[in-house]
Image: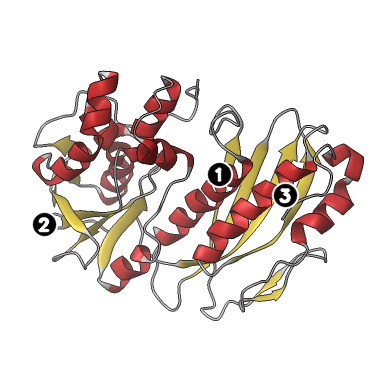
Amino acid sequence: MATDDPAETLAGLGEFAVIDRLVADREQPPAVALGPGDDAAVLDAPDGKTVVSTDMLVAQRHFRLDWSTPHDVGRKAIAQNAADIEAMGARATAFVVAFGAPADTATAQALELADGMWHEARLLGAGIVGGDLVSAPQWVVSVTALGDLDGRRPVLRSGARAGDTVAVAGGLGLSAAGFSLWHKDISQFDELRRRHLVPEPPYGQGRVAADAGATAMTDVSDGLLADLGHIAEASGVVVDVSTDMLSADRETVAAAAAVIGADPWGWVLGGGEDHALVATFAGAPPDGWRVIGRVRDGAPRVLVDGAEWQGDPGWQSFDSLG
């Protein structure tokens, strides 16, 4: 969706006219009984339960517009929220978006942001059903995701038991590698740079895991070890991951690490924002998942090859993007 006047701003066009542009000609999925245009949207919930998650992106904190296009930001905002829904064993059905931006923001940028959101939502068969638009000193994108369990029980973090297999779906360390490449202005390794801007969660694998009897699950948003730490604490178990089983992930980022002079294991074990899924299973994991470790009895903690990891376990919410 584009605007005829590239100099047109949000303030110049006005809130309601901008909203009209943002929602015009968008086709909602069947689960949306009533979309934007009233005080609230109405969704069908055939399961009788609704899975809800919310997350926020702040400019210079979670993205930079000198690295990312507005379309990239829109895709990332939807993807990271959809991954939370996947991690419960559900499917995302709809998103509600609030967008804050300076008054002089070009309307074309807001429309491009919306296009990115819709692009990602359509990959899931979901829609964007409402939201808000406000003036703010910098870009802030807040997304609430809604999902349907389709009759499944939600997969919690608290169900892992000693003897379970730990498995992952999706890549690890790619976003962290891409961030380092962007930060150091290294123009090689385009795919890694791209994966920092737009993550690729393994859509559908949350439901596959739930149907296969996953005992616990989460998405890798803060870093593999940090997020497995949530499972370990909630379940009261030790999670022990194997570097041998993660060697393919290391090899994927090893060349970039060599150029930068970084430890690739730091990216694989502590890098966040890949939004892969990690889960525990009482037996073998289903297709699309690969084993990376085991669950053991003991005081809750995460080990690497049976020992405490001495590196950074993951993202801290009040660190700076730089």
Q: Nearer the viewer, residue 290 or 119?
A: 119
Q: Disc 1 residue type?
A: Asp
Indicate the amino acid at tag 2: Gly
Residue 226 versus residue 212 in the image, above or below: above
Amino acid type, mark 3? Leu
Q: CA distance from mark 2 to mark 1?
A: 41 Å
Which residue in the protein does label 3 denote? 111
Residue 209, image x, y percentages:
29, 66
Image location of residue 20, percent across then percent down = 83, 58
Give the residue pinned by disc 1: 72
Q: Residues within 10 Å of mark 3 (few under 14, many from 20)?
A: many
In the image, 268 versus 280, the foreground residue is 268
- The numbered mark, 2 or 3, whose residue comes first in the sequence reads 3
Q: Secondary structure at mark 3?
A: helix
Residue 59, by quadrant, is top right
Callout 1 touching callout 3 (CB < 8 Å): no
Indicate the quadrant containing the N terminus: top left, top right, bottom left or bottom right.
bottom right
Instruction: Answer few, some or many: residues within 10 Å of disc 1's Cα (few below 14, many 20 plus, some between 14 and 19).
Output: many
Compare marks 1 and 3 and give the one earlier in the sequence.
1
For disc 2, the marked residue is 163
Q: Residue at x 22, y 23 (%)?
A: 258
Residue shown at 78% from the left, 32% from the top: 102
**As displayed, is residue 157 above or below residue 14?**
below
Q: Position of residue 294 (x, y in %)?
A: 13, 50
Q: Please give the count of numbered marks on the rendered protein.
A: 3
| Label 1: element kind | helix
The answer to the question of whether label 2 and label 3 lie on touching residues, with beta carbons closer than 8 A, is no
